[in-house]
Amino acid sequence: MKAMSNERFAEAVLGMERSRKSFKPSATYIPEGDCIEFMFAPDNYRAHRIDGLVTVYYSRKTDRVIGGLIKGVRAFCKKMEEKYPGFRMSIEVRPVRVDYFFLAQLWTQPSESTGTEFVRAYRELLQMTNEQPLEVDAGDLCQTE
Amino acid sequence: MHSIFVRMGKAVTKRRVRLSTNAIDPVSGQLMVVEYAHAKLQNCCRGNAGQIHEAANLVPMILLKPHAVFRGLKRDADEPVKNNEEGWLCYSGIPTHAYNEDGTPRGSWPKEVFLVFVSSDKVVYNWYWYESDPSNPSLPKGHKERFRERII
């Protein structure tokens, strides 16, 4: 397979901009990375890795959480299901709320791993998902194939 | 208040024609073809003009001229292996510029690096600016704890 030139690639991506609609908060599953990316605002941001599950995006304008990434979604669900079989019931009922991932991570962390930054980020994530609930209409999340 | 749905079933994993560029293969030093996750590109296009320009210009730039490339993610002992994660690559570099929200170019963000993530199937699925290591500003902060090995 031959790659596109960088110029042609840039042209194609910038061409997608022309079909851009007004921003709406959204969450997207990216199967190639087994991750869910969610955005609450269209601000420029810097990313910060909170733990092995979540990377948050901080707005450059407000320094508030405006999005983030949940990584290794299926592996996380598998691990949760093995340790806490009841978790499966939560994610079997579709659509699954995205904040379930945050709560599951919070409730299973040993206290020594929860520093100030961790607490701040998860608090903001829960606040944001309370104001703007995100849901995942998912397949079998415990399947790791 | 309204809810947002994300579809994760087979429908979204259907093969479609993906955009592609060249990237440096960190093992051989030769060029390799990488494709781009369509869902990620679509996300960018829902953002601001600067994010679209980042995708269009900065991602291919870093894939061709990274300051460092890391392979594999470190994980906790009880964490199950994620799909082919050992082959995942993270390209790190400092682009010549960044973009304002209106898409106009500006200087690169101080004390930050631009990271690009590539799956073991050679699909680019994410990228973002990240705080740099104070002792080596061309590397991401915490790289020793985060990645299994540095190839370049």
Image (spheres, rainbow, N blue to C red):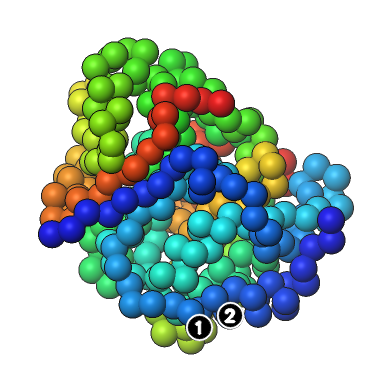
Res. B37 mark? none
Q: Chain of mark 2?
A: A
Q: Tell me if A90 is positioned left or right of A141 in this view.
A: left
Element type where label 2 sits in the image = helix
Residue at 49 percent across and 20 percent down: it is B80
Element type where label 1 sits in the image = loop
Q: Tell me if B133 is positioned left or right of B14 in this view.
A: left
Outermost residue, front side: B11
Circle 1 residues within 10 Å: few <14, some 14–19, many ≥20 = few
Whole-percent x, y for residue B72 in the image: 61, 34
Relative to residue A129, is residue A3 depicted above or below? below
Whole-percent x, y for residue A84 in the image: 28, 15
Q: Chain of mark 1?
A: A
Spatial separation of the CA atoms under disc 1 and disc 2: 6 Å
Res. A18 mark? 1
Residue at 30 percent across and 68 percent down: it is A24
User: Foreground: B114 or A81?
Assistant: A81
Instruction: Determine contact: label 1, label 2, CB under 8 Å.
Output: yes
Circle 2: residue type: Gly
Whole-percent x, y for residue B1 in the image: 13, 59
Is residue A45 in view?
yes
User: Foreground: A28 or B150?
Assistant: A28
Is residue B97 in view?
no
User: Foreground: B53 or B9?
Assistant: B9
Circle 1: residue type: Arg
Whole-percent x, y for residue B135 in the image: 51, 50
Query: What residue is shown with label 2?
Result: A15
Residue at 53 percent across and 63 percent down: it is B41
